[in-house]
Image (cartoon, grey):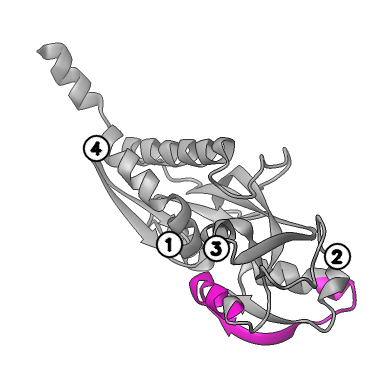
Amino acid sequence: MRRDARGQADRPRGAVTIGLSPGVSDIIGAAFATRAARQFPEIRLRLAIGFVHDLEKQLEEGAIDAAMLNGPGASARLAAEPLLAEPLCLICAAADRRFEGAAVPLRALAGVPLVLAGRPDSWVRRALRDALGQEALGIEVAAEADTVAIAKRLVLAGLGPMVDVASMVRAEILEGRLRAVPLGALAITRLLVMPRGREPSPAAVAAAGLLRDCAREMLASGLWLGARAPAASAGP
């Protein structure tokens, strides 16, 4: 009985808050929370859903313990570990045959009105602006929406294609309603991020490790659509 008591005392316990963006929470949130409840019943887990810049700020302020953020990099005050990479894709209606082939060159977007998903300062939108700027191209806007959930509905309604990762529209791709074609060489990295200079609790370490395991398993099994192993140099 003493051994059992020691084992229970050694289990991580207490409150932990993990940050996820709305799209990432749809992919991994439920599976992660379910595993955490079963594997670490003494941890009181809270998922904080927010935009990447807001989550970075909350990490720096100590309001959340860890988060999965987009890269290539995070704040210098945060420690980041690459988990997986995803190519940015042109996402269009399945019947839209303007964009065929294994990949779409950036110049194919010339004159194409786009549905823009995410806030203007999001990593995806900044990466798209920078890449098109290097080609001396601008962005023609059909519509804008803060969330992918709304943006993909606008694509399905025929307003135009959008640029994001295939995992954000996995269900619609599998249903045959949307297609996702890699756009040039653009990609994002998903990072496991924790604050520097602050000792995490055992519960936070355990929860972050479980999030890492869940992401890697979804990558290996193909459940994280379009994901690949990150480049060795990814992350800060």
The residues bearing labels 2 and 1 have C-alpha atoms spaced at a distance of 37 Å
Mark closer to the chain start, 2 or 3:
2
The amino acid at mark 3 is: Glu
Q: Nearer the viewer, mark 3 or mark 4?
A: 3
42 left or right, relative to 27: left
Q: Quick check: marks 3 and 4 in contact, CB under 8 Å?
A: no
Magenta segment: does it hold 134? Answer: yes
Report the amino acid beneath label 1.
Gln
Residue drawn at (68%, 75%) of the image: 161
Looking at the image, tell me whether mark 3 or mark 1 is earlier in sequence order: 1
**Disc 3 crowd, CA 10 A, few/some/many (<14, 14-19, 20+):** some
Check disc 3 and report its element: helix, strand or loop.
helix
Q: Disc 3 designates what residue?
A: 172
Which numbered disc, 2 or 3, marks the residue closer to the eye?
Answer: 3
- The residue carrying mark 2 is 105
Which is nearer the eye, 199 or 211? 211
Which region is colored magenta? 132-155
- As helix, strand or loop, the secondary structure at mark 4 comes to loop
Q: Position of residue 235 (x, y in %)?
A: 66, 47
Amino acid type, label 2:
Pro
In three-dimensional space, the C-alpha distance between marks 3 and 1, rounded to whole angstroms, equals 32 Å
CA distance for labels 1 and 4? 22 Å
The residue depicted at 68 percent of the width and 80 percent of the height is 160
* Mark 2 burial class by Cα count in 10 Å: few <14, some 14-19, many 20+: few
Instruction: Say which mark, if any, is on residue 13.
Output: 4
Sequence-first tag of 3 and 4: 4
Taking 63 as reference, is 7 above or below it? above
User: Is there CB contact under 8 Å for labels 2 and 3?
Assistant: no
